[in-house]
Amino acid sequence: MISRTEPPATISNTTDLAYLGATEALGLFRSRDLSPVELLEAVLQRIDAVNPRVNALTEQLTDEARIAARDAERQYHSNGEYRFGGQPGPLLGLPVAAKEKHSLAGHVLSNGLVGQRDVVASSDHPVISRIRSAGGIVHARTTTPEFCCATVTHSPLWGVTRNPFNLALSPGGSSGGSGAALAAGFAPLATGSDIAGSTRLPAAFTGTVGFKAPYGRIPGVAPLAADYYRGDSPMARTVADAALLANVMAGRHPGDHASLAATRPLPGSWASVEGLRIALCIQLGDYLVDPDVEANTRAVTAALQGAGAIVEEVELPWTSAEIHRVSFTHFGNILGPAMEDETRGTESELAAYTVQFMADARAAAAGTRFLDGLSAETRIQGELAAVMTGFDALICPTSAVAALTAAEHYLDGITAGGQHLEHYWQAHMTVPFNIANRCPVLAVPSGLADCGIPTGVQIVGHPFDDDTVFRVGAAVETVRPWAYRYTLIGG
């Protein structure tokens, strides 16, 4: 695979080309050293070669993608006569893999459910509309677990999606198809969504970048757009590419009244972290963090210290059991009932993890009032704010465990640190920042686990301070470079 420091002339085969970054590709399009048609064909060849083993895609839009790529090529060769106000669209000619839940008009919108395999969307999701308006080419759609309710990606409808670094392991979920697609070279950009870590966990397990934006930054679709835990997300292989897609996806939308007005775009390059104060929290209270995950997290902050950041270790008074109770009280009043409404009459067709999720959510709602959940959420938010006072950002692991098995349902919980945890989500460290829903969180790779797949860290910012988490993420990318470093199946 190519190094990001090599000149374009060294791109010698389709595998190299399939791993070209979005920002780099745009520069080559503009200089006419590369055509959008060439990039798309390299990506399609990569999909043909590798996807049968990874199973990251639900659908390919090959014919219409080729038409769009040829149109983009014509625009780049038209002496500046672009369709976007005299300038090339910010994504013009780039292939983008879209999570299946992001609807495309005229295409199936199943949410991974056998019972909805014939449901056809009547309109594009807002993020799809914006990607297409910016010149992006949606050439493939990516797998999820049913109703995006698991952190592994498999379903009776689509089968098992596997991690390109180790096919026995999961790419995470629920945006596991997007993470696997990026890692396998199927697209330079992909869409995700995040209600409990569904963007950040796949980013960690696949060595990619995922951004959980503050609630309202990126518009969603009613009625679950009103769920303040959730949000739609950009995913990419580099920090600058994630920022590029975030800028396109963000901003007020008439269909989502909670969406926020556009702010100053993320710049794509950032100042150093010299002088920034960063809090390091390894366990977020009592999460049982695998030794290799902890070692990689500490290596990240040590490298940032070497770049001039001031790092101080802090503690939080949380327990994974309490975070789980609080979050499932929330799910039991919002997502769980929505899932039951959507799946009524088709229960026999559901994956076991979906049935378990709805049962857990129902039990939590029956045992705790929504008001009590809100009280706990505001206390957790306050505890985070107190710990982050005096710091510019906080860094912690993304998942306490380094890996999940690809086809497992985890109905009986998970073992972590030699202890049995009641629910496998207690091994993930993402949910607290869905509770702290206005905080931006950027997930970036931190190294390799002992099992051979990547690990990741979360960079948590103060409410709506998106730029700082990208600034820190860009520094991590510089001092702990990961791009194209690992050996993937198929080349």
Image: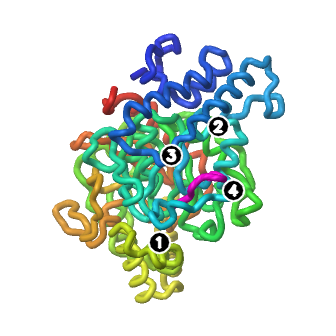
Mark 4 burial class by Cα count in 10 Å: few <14, some 14-19, many 20+: few
Q: Amino acid at mark 2?
A: Gly
Residue ID for mark 3: 59
For residue 125, which numbered disc appears in the image?
none
For residue 123, which numbered disc appears in the image?
4
**Main secondary structure along the magenta-highlighted residues:** loop
Q: Amino acid at mark 4?
A: Ser
Instruction: Say which of marks 1 and 4 sits in front.
Output: 4
Confirm or deny contact between disc 1 and disc 2 (CB under 8 A): no
Left or right of 398? Residue 439 is right
Which segment did they paint magenta? 104-110
387 drawn magenta = no
Q: Amino acid at mark 3?
A: Glu
Left or right of 93? Residue 440 is left
Confirm or deny contact between disc 4 and disc 3 (CB under 8 A): no
Which picture quadrant has residue 348? Answer: bottom left
Instruction: Say which of marks 1 and 3 sits in front.
Output: 3
Which picture quadrant has residue 269? Answer: top right
Instruction: Say which of marks 1 and 2 sits in front.
Output: 2
Which residue does the image show at 53% across and 34% down from the upper left?
272
Q: Secondary structure at mark 3?
A: strand
Residue ID for mark 1: 380
Residue ID for mark 2: 136
Choose the circle earlier in sequence order: 1 or 4.
4
Left or right of 418? Residue 452 is right
The CA span between labels 1 and 3 is 40 Å
The relative height of residue 284 versus residue 471 in the rendered view (above or below) is below
Confirm or deny contact between disc 3 and disc 2 (CB under 8 A): no
